[in-house]
Image (tube, rainbow, N blue to C red):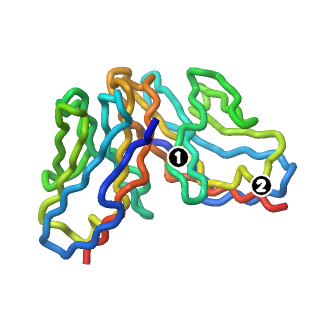
Amino acid sequence: KAGVTQTPRYLIKTRGQQVTLSCSPISGHRSVSWYQQTPGQGLQFLFEYFSETQRNKGNFPGRFSGRQFSNSRSEMNVSTLELGDSALYLCASSLGTGRYNEQFFGPGTRLTVL
Amino acid sequence: AQRVTQPEKLLSVFKGAPVELKCNYSYSGSPELFWYVQYSRQRLQLLLRHISRESIKGFTADLNKGETSFHLKKPFAQEEDSAMYYCALSRHSGYSTLTFGKGTMLLVSP
């Protein structure tokens, strides 16, 4: 069974631009969560989607948004990029929502903002 | 708000020595605790979770609600245990949201 895939793997943008990251969950998984990983703050929760609905949102500004499609694939968008948005963005999928569902992580997208 | 604290950024031990990776949490409710591991050049993956009470790769972790701790232990470290270890907490049964600690790098020397 193929794992969680994220595209692109690496991205370089300049301040003020916007970016869209994509996540394809494991086949059959309906829940997708996004995390931001930085050396200073560690892993921080961004969003959780289940059946195209945002179930939970972390403490990030409105520049960070996401969505989930009917095939469970998910995208996250960051508008008006800032230097501090440079991070590894991880996507995780699980069969269902709820803490008893094991989450499987993707390899991440490394975003660099210049 | 919930918080997970891993006091050690780096733990260095020799092969065969016991290992204890510390994790403390703050949450007033009934949390579910996890340990995730990331080996070099690999994805973050679940090592074990409190509710299953399993021993994975020789690692165990006991939830101590009185001390709000969930320390990860292994009696005899192996070189292949070298990795980054993250303690995580899930506070709400209806969500998958995880709150992570900042991680501890375990280095096992021969």
Query: x, y percentage for residue A52?
Result: 18, 31
Instruction: Return the disc, 2 or 1, that comes first in the chain's sequence.
Output: 1
- State which quadrant residue A84 falls in: bottom left
Q: Which residue is mark 1?
A: B5
Q: Which residue is mark 2?
A: B79
Looking at the image, residue B51 sits to the left or right of residue B53; the answer is left
Q: Contact, CB < 8 Å: mark 2 with mark 1?
A: no
Mark 1 closeness class: few <14, some 14–19, many ≥20 residues within 10 Å: some
Give the Cα separation between the discs numbered 2 and 1: 25 Å
| Element type where label 1 sits in the image | strand
Q: Is residue B18 above or below residue B56?
A: below
Q: Residue at x 76, y 46 (%)?
A: B19
Q: Chain of mark 1?
A: B
**Which residue reaches farthest bottom?**
A114
Q: Residue at x 35, y 61 (%)?
A: A9
Indicate which label's residue lies in the foreground, 2 or 1: 2
The amino acid type of the residue labelled 1 equals: Thr
Q: Residue at x 40, y 28 (%)?
A: B91
| Element type where label 2 sits in the image | helix
Query: x, y percentage for residue B99?
Result: 42, 40
Looking at the image, residue A80 sits to the left or right of residue B13; the answer is left
- State the residue in front, B40 or B31: B40
Q: Is residue A51 above or below residue B102?
A: above
